[in-house]
Image (spheres, rainbow, N blue to C red):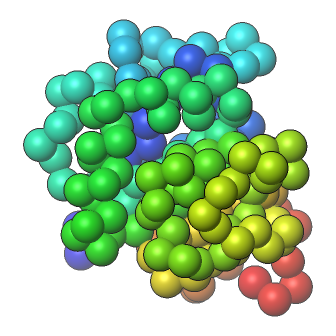
Amino acid sequence: MTAPKILLPLAHGFEEIEAVTVIDILRRAGADLTIAALQGKEVTGGHDITITCDAQLGDLLDRVWDWIILPGGTEGVNRMLANDDLMAILKKHHSQQKAIAAICAAPLILDREMLTNGQAITIHPAIAPQIQFTKIDNQPVIKKNLLITGRSAGAAMTFAFTLVKEIFGHEKAIQLNKGVMAELPANF
């Protein structure tokens, strides 16, 4: 079985905990994950940590992904919302009924682009007042059909392991967590 192809776009001002936790856990699981910068090759997060990306988003416009994962960080999310290439990729991905995950401020993108299919999402409480079209459920992580949302950086590990569970199966998530020892919810 080939590893699923996953896109994780990064924009300046991204939330480092959310991005790095997801990248690390998914790569440990064996995902074919591409970190794509909206511009340039190096992207600096909101707390001055710089990531060297695998590619520039503009070079990936014709690629097909199994998953797109959006990290938060208000400044990064605002830059993602303003990026026409990323919005086109997301809309195409959604129209093909492919999975999307977003954490912290990033579910705002799903709401603005109407990509939630009416499903409830979770989002950072500071961003929640900006939600216009979607119901909010204040849980750490919500998984509904082809959509996974996470509330905040504090939920990053549960969010990452929920992605592993959905992409690779429950057994893989539990096996991987034996080395990481994340405190996952009792109902995981």
How many dots with numbers? Answer: 0
- Quadrant of residue 85 within the rendered picture: top left
Residue ID at (58%, 78%): 119
Residue 32 in view: no
Query: From what the image shows, is residue 141 above or below residue 26?
Result: below
Q: Nearer the viewer, residue 98 or 53?
A: 98
Q: Nearer the viewer, residue 31 or 126?
A: 126
Residue ID at (60%, 63%): 133
Q: Which of 179 and 80 is in front in this view?
A: 80
Residue ID at (56%, 18%): 12
Q: Nearer the viewer, residue 12 or 91?
A: 91
Query: From what the image shows, is residue 167 above or below residue 27?
Result: below
Furthest toward the left, the residue is: 62
Furthest toward the bottom, the residue is: 187
Q: Where is residue 96 in the image (x, y as percent from the top left)?
A: 23, 69
Left of 44 or right of it: where is 62?
left
Left of 109 or right of it: where is 34?
left
Q: Position of residue 40 (x, y in %)?
A: 36, 10
Left of 40 or right of it: where is 121?
right
Quadrant placement of the C terminus: bottom right
Residue 13 in view: yes
Residue ID at (28%, 59%): 93
Query: From what the image shows, is residue 2 above or below residue 7?
Result: below
Left of 67 or right of it: where is 26?
right
Q: Where is residue 8 in the image (x, y as percent from the top left)?
A: 44, 42
Q: Where is residue 22 in the image (x, y as percent from the top left)?
A: 60, 49
- Quadrant of residue 176 within the rendered picture: bottom right
Quadrant placement of the N terminus: bottom left
Furthest toward the front, the residue is: 132
